[in-house]
Structures are given as structure tokens and as C-alpha cells.
Amino acid sequence: MKSAAQIVRDVRSGESSATAELERSLQAVRARNDDLHVFLHVDEEGARAAAARVDERIAAGGDGGALAGVPIAIKDNMCQTGVPTTCSSRILEGWRPPYNATVIDRLLDAGAVPVGKTNLDEFAMGSSTENSAFGPTRNPLDPSRVPGGSSGGSAAAVASDMTPVALGSDTGGSIRQPAAFCGLIGVKPSYGLVSRYGLIAFASSLDQIGPFSKTVMDSALVLEAIAGHDPMDSTSLPEASPSISAHVDDGVAGRRFGLVRELVDGADDDVLAQVERAVEALREAGADVVELSIPELRLGLSAYYLIAPAEASSNLARFDGVRYGRRVDGDDVTAMMEATRTAGFGAEVKRRIMLGTYALSAGYYDAYYGQALKVRTQMIDAFGRAYRDVDTLIGATAPTVAFAFGAKTADPMAMYLSDVFTIPTNLAGEAALSVPFGTGVDDMPVGVQLLGPGRSEAGLFAAARVLEIADGR
Amino acid sequence: MAPELRREDVAHVARLARLTLSDAELDMFTEQLRSVLEHADDMATLDLEGVVATAHPFGLINVVRDDVVRASLDRDVVLAEAPDVEDGRFAVPRIMGEAP
């Protein structure tokens, strides 16, 4: 599969066309989608029209945009006009949004071609896609294993060469963990860097949209295209999209990294071995790497599993059978809403709605939600202290390589623990990415996580590029 | 430490969240939610007196736009996706009891 950067070059030079690149992508989807269950909906008609527009722009003398002719897969929790958008939930089955998410508009402006909507854990709640109401996605590298989640469909689209790039959303690791499990770059941008307008909300203070790709440069190109202030998202950062691709080859000479004990403790030995190799690679490239401890990160999982469900319980109140999606009839409005929500939501979504409702209820608010918000403050302060000493933090993305189907479905707490290293970044609103580095047991890929303060993306991408080169890619 | 979650707490929360649970689901969710809350006890028992709460990663203050009328989605386009519509509005089953 060609990289997105190569496709842009070929489409602009006339070597290829957006239409030809799309047809190649659609062919790959047809070949493997039935087996892997990556796309919930393939928008052939819309994609062909978008590709034709790019080819017309180029025929008219334009450059076609920064992503000219690049097929891209979209996680099915982002709205696209007229294209079914389900969040992998029965409650939104058949719904067609009447508007585009800002990221869709920006991709189209940049000449990218959205191919279709990818599978996820219902409402992005999960770490394996096993919570999708429409069945799980299989890991293209080993179909007996999960692709990770919640953005598992988008990760699998790129790993199986259906599209060179994809968009996911990351609330507690939902881009980085599947990127690690599928051997990809996956980026959780700084909170507010990418507009959330049209991203169906799970936990609004934690959610961010970001890219998947096989190369560091491709994620840089996609992130540049979708980032930047959006008046439609009041939590969007005020500045324009940052320059990232120009800094990918900046290297790490003279930069100071911190290997964080709490971001490797509990990881399997095969994962640890690759993190240690990554530390050596950074040192060889001229970086200074020290070991440090941020004990506050140990409370991340507890705080997250009160804050995220609390916000979800509020955000998902809108799914009540009145304005969109599915309705199950009842004698009065309350009975209708209860019947709709009971039939429409799966078990994990119900679990989190109830957990959040409980954490916010009278008598328990201070002990749970209130306490979690204070822990969040401590975590932000602790990261801030670490970043006075080092530029970038390093750790594992996930404690294990991709696990087998059914390995963690019986025990929600075991599933939640697979996000233990990724959650702190979301709570702090900072930036992090996962870069594939070596392999672990059974030749499955390992993800190394790089973390930085808000707006530090350019530096993270440069470090990821150093690891990409050291890993022979 | 917060008191242990009881089965009736889960039933109450399910009612608040407009969810109907079977007896088997009540048992299952009570056990699972208890395990998550037990994990949270490491946090619930901390002395965080005086620590300021963070509800949002930035210290956001209200973000407002100029108060001018702008185009929005067409009403018919929005209603086309609704489960039930009457006279240009969302229709729902009755909200109050029968008239006496």
C-alpha cells in the first residue's frame, strides 16, 4: 500500500488520480471486509463523487489539497451528511446525520476521500470492539485477536491496507491502544487542537479526534489538515493548525526524555523489552533519557472510571427516542424512553451510564466524582512538575500485545486495566502518541508511548520519527 | 470509605437513567459496579482537603459569539430523522395522565 504522502505526490503529478486510488481502496475493502468486519458502511457513491471533485480540482490547475486523493476511513462516531452513523449502537441504527463534523469538512477541503464508517465499541466504550452491537472487528495481523478499541475498525482499516490513514477518537486510549495492537502510529492530540463538532460525545472533557497511519509523516499530514480553531466547538484552542510535518525530521539531539516508572510497571516482559530498546534508540540519536516516577498517575484509572462515566451518563441522556434514532413504543413518554433505552443500549453502555449516574447522585457526589476531579488536578500538577525537568515522557502504550477474543469480556475491570497507561494523558488534556516498535510474543507488534505537554505535537512526531527509523521503517 | 453499593442502589440508579433491568441483570451489574467502586476506594480515602477540583483541562471561561442570527439546519431536514412527527414538531406519547 502506498503511503498517503506518496498518493498526494502521484495524484498531483498525474501519475495517478484520486479516482484510481479510491478504486484500489474499495477493492481492498471488498476483498477483506467480510472476514475482518472493519467497515459498518462503505459510502461508495459519496467517495466516488469526492474523488471526482479532487480530480477536477487538479485538472483545473489546482494542487488538489494537502491530502489530494487520499482515501481515509472514519470511525462511526463522527457525523457525515447523509451517511449512516451508528456509534455501533442499536439506538442509532439507520440514522443519517443532517450535517458534517468539522473534521469531515476539513478532510474534504484538503482533498481527502472518506471511504466509509468503521466499527467501534458501542459509543467508544471499550478496548477491543467486542462491545459493538454489530459484532467485533478482527485484528488483520492475527484474526484470532482483538484489534484493540474503541477505534478498532479504523486501526484495522489501515493495518489491512484498505486505506493508508484513518480517523479515530481517544477518550482514555481509544486511538493509541488499537494503534499499538495493530502496529500503527496513533495520535491523541492536545485537548482542543481538533474540533469535536460532530463527534458524538462520550466524555466531553476527555474526547479528542486523531489520526492512524503506517508512517509518522502520514499522521502529521492528517493532523495538520484537521487541527485548528473551530468556532463551532467552544472548547477548541484559539490558534490555527500548527506546523507538524515540517518538524518530523528535526531529530531528538539534545532533548531530554523521562522514562516513567508508572507507565511501564505491570507491563508484560515482551512489552518492557521493546520500551527499553526504544530508550536506547533515543539515546543513540543524541537524546538524554532519565528514569523518573510520577506516583499520581497510579490514581488515573480510578479517577477516569468515575469522570468518564459521569460525563457519559449526561451526554447519553439525549438518546431517548424523541428526536433521532430508534424508538420503542410505550404507553406514556417515560415508558417510551425507558423501553427505547433498554432495547437500544448494550451492557457496557448501561454499566457506564449507571456508574456515572451513581457517582453524580446525592450523597455520593463528594466521595466519588468530587474526589476524582481533585485527583485530576493533582495529576495535571504532577505532569507539569515532570515537564519542568524533561521535554517528553516515554512509557508503554498498553501492558500487553493484542489479546484473544473473549479474554477480558467477563470482567469489566480487567478490560479497563488495558487503558491504564493511556488514561492519564486524557485527564490532563495533553498530547501523546503510540509508535510501533519491535514485536512481542507471537510476533505481535508493541506500541511505545510518547507523551508531552499541551501543544507539543511537533516534538512528539520528531521523536516518533527517530523510533520509526531505528525500527527499520 | 464510601458505603458498599447495594442492589437497591443499582435499581434506583437504573430508574433515574431510564433503564429497565431484569433480576439477573441487577445481580450482575451490582457485582460489577461494586468491583469498579472498590477500585476507586484508593482515591476515595485520600485526604484532598484544599485541592481545587478540575472539571475541564483548560481554565475555560464562557465562550460566546456575536449575537447575530445565522443560518441553521432546515426544520424539515431535521424532522426527517425523527421517529414521529406531527405538524412540524417532534411527536411523543402522552406526557400527563388522562383528562378526568
Image (spheres, helix red, strand yellow):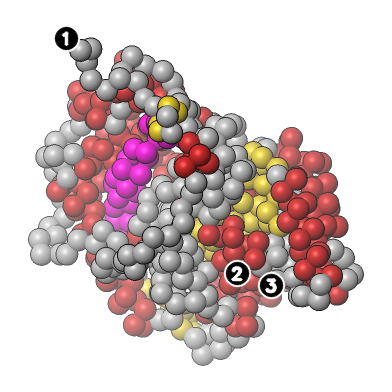
Residue A32 part of the magenta-drawn span: no
Q: Label 1 neighbourhood size at 10 Å, few (<14), some (14-19), many (20+)?
A: few
Residue occupying image coordinates x 14% and y 48%: A366
Question: Most prominent secondary structure in the magenta stretch?
Answer: helix
Range covered by the magenta-colored residues: A295-324
Where is mark 3, residue-wise?
A66
Type of residue at label 2?
Ala
Residue B54, label in figure? none
Rendered position, A437 above or below B10: below
Q: CA distance from mark 1 to mark 3?
A: 67 Å
Q: Label 2 neighbourhood size at 10 Å, few (<14), some (14-19), many (20+)?
A: many
Type of residue at label 3?
Ala
Where is mark 1, residue-wise?
B100
Dot 2 and dot 3 residues touching (CB under 8 Å)? yes
Q: Is residue A8 left or right of residue B55?
A: right
- State the residue in front, A241 or A254: A241
Task: Tell us which disc is closer to us: 1 or 3.
Answer: 1
Q: CA distance from mark 2 to mark 3?
A: 7 Å
Instruction: Indicate the quadrant containing the C terminus of chain B: top left, top right, bottom left or bottom right.
Output: top left
For the image, the number of numbered tags is 3
Rendering quarter of residue A224: bottom right
Where is mark 2, residue-wise?
A225
Q: Position of residue B78 (x, y in %)?
A: 49, 41
Mark 2 lies on a secondary structure that is helix
**Can residue B48 be seen at all in this image of the molecule?**
yes
Q: Label 3 neighbourhood size at 10 Å, few (<14), some (14-19), many (20+)?
A: many
Q: Chain of mark 2?
A: A
**Can residue A10 be seen at all in this image of the molecule?**
no
